[in-house]
Image (tube, rainbow, N blue to C red):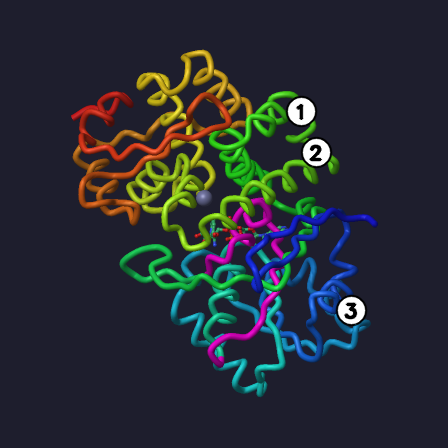
Amino acid sequence: MNFETVRVGLGDRSYDIRIGYGLLAQIGIFCQTAGMGGNAVLISNPKVASLYRELVVKSLGSADIKVTDICIPDGEEFKSSDTLLKIFDQMIDAHIDRGAFILALGGGVVGDIAGFAAATYLRGIPFIQVPTTLLAQVDSSVGGKTGINHPRGKNLLGAFYQPQQVVIDTETLDTLPEREYISGLAEALKYGISLDNELFVYFEKYLTAILDRDKECLKQIIMISCKTKACIVEQDEREGGLRAVLNYGHTLGHAVESLTGYTKYLHGEAVAIGMAQIARLSAQRGYCSAAEADRVLQLISRMGLPVELPQFTVTEYENALLHDKKKLSDGVKFVFNQGIGNYKFETVKDLKELLHSCGVRG
Ligand SMILES: NC(=O)c1ccc[n+]([C@@H]2O[C@H](COP(=O)([O-])OP(=O)(O)OC[C@H]3O[C@@H](n4cnc5c(N)ncnc54)[C@H](O)[C@@H]3O)[C@@H](O)[C@H]2O)c1
Ligand SMILES: [Zn+2]
């Protein structure tokens, strides 16, 4: 066997995540073992399709699976209701019925919108996630959050809808642009800092090989990340409480993204800034030592990710934080790190004080 399996245990909605190098050529067999056959709706974008569509279609063909192609434009701005309706139009035109399944081939944008299409078309048809960015492989393809953006905010419309299987071919990372790759690493590191000390230490020890995209290192990081996420999702599928731990570094990260108009930083870069600031704040609050916070900052910097907040006023940051979905009536819920590899929730009422502690002025 040239792949590893991580199981997401959710009763009758349980599924496997397959992780290995070169798995796209076996995608037809994976679909069959997940009980899928007949017609597949292959949703992708022009860039990913030009690289990997042929391989996937050939493998599906050898498993007697017929393919209907849907290509959506590349970019976060196309994770929209407009694109979703166009997907439905093409599915209806192709007479796709409940016997078919969707196969999402691409990064988080394709995975989120294809998953939402699967959740809602004919009140739900099965789908398979085939993530091709590191961010999608360690995070968005696992856990069942699907959705689209609304002009007034990101990810405001969606559904919890689990895939039948996730097939992660780490070979697809060979073509990923460097900046996207490093940004994806930030999401994997998030699990290390807030949930898994061993993963953090693995990053420290093998960083050079990881930055060189060493096959074995990638398999390890993706496998541990998926296991960690699966473990949280199994306990709190619909984010009643615990699942919010996966937002480590994200509350400040989202503020950075929104203040900079979603253009200056990639998502993982903004999260890296958020994680660095939270590590410092965790030390100030006594949740971790100064030395531990320093290790977090050093590692983030060594990865080539940013650590400092861009310059905006306290009021601007405060407004951005208050618009985040994680806002509660009595404050904003933050995830701090308890040492390295553990977390601590704290609802912060005095945002000004927190922002001053991060060195934000004005
Ligand atoms: N559902 C969840 O739980 C969850 C979690 C985190 C993020 N997300 C969502 O994920 C999205 C971001 O995902 P992303 O970072 O993967 O961005 P993306 O899907 O936009 O992909 C980034 C870029 O990489 C290209 N690409 C993809 N695979 C490639 C490959 N193998 N080789 C070369 N280029 C490739 C894409 O075409 C795109 O240009 C956001 O919409 C975010 O909201 C969802
Ligand atoms: Zn994220």
At label 3, which amino acid type do we have? Lys
Q: Name the residue under label 3.
A: 58
Packing grade of label 2 (10 A; few <14, some 14-19, many >=20) is some
Q: Left of 287 or right of it: where is 15?
A: right
From which residue to which does the magenta span run? 122-146
Packing grade of label 3 (10 A; few <14, some 14-19, many >=20) is some
At label 1, which amino acid type do we have? Tyr
Alpha carbons under labels 2 and 1: distance apart = 8 Å
> Marks 2 and 1: CB-CB under 8 Å?
yes
Circle 2 SS class: helix
Q: Left of 124 or right of it: where is 244?
A: left
Kindly identify the residue that appears in the image at 52 percent across and 85 percent down: 92
Circle 3 SS class: helix
Picture disc at residue 217: 2
Q: Does the magenta stretch include residue 135?
A: yes
Circle 1 SS class: helix
* Disc nearer the start of the sequence (2/1): 1
- Frontmost residue, 340 versus 111: 340
Percent position of residue 214, x then y: 72, 34
Percent position of residue 331, x then y: 21, 39
Given this view, does label 2 or label 3 mark the residue nearer the observer? 2
* Disc nearer the start of the sequence (2/3): 3
Does the rendering let one see residue 266?
no
> Does 67 appear above or below 244?
below
Packing grade of label 1 (10 A; few <14, some 14-19, many >=20) is few
Q: Mark 1 points at which residue?
A: 206
Quadrant of image for the C terminus = top left
Kindly identify the residue that appears in the image at 82 percent across and 72 percent down: 62
* Disc nearer the start of the sequence (1/3): 3
> Does 139 appear above or below 187?
below
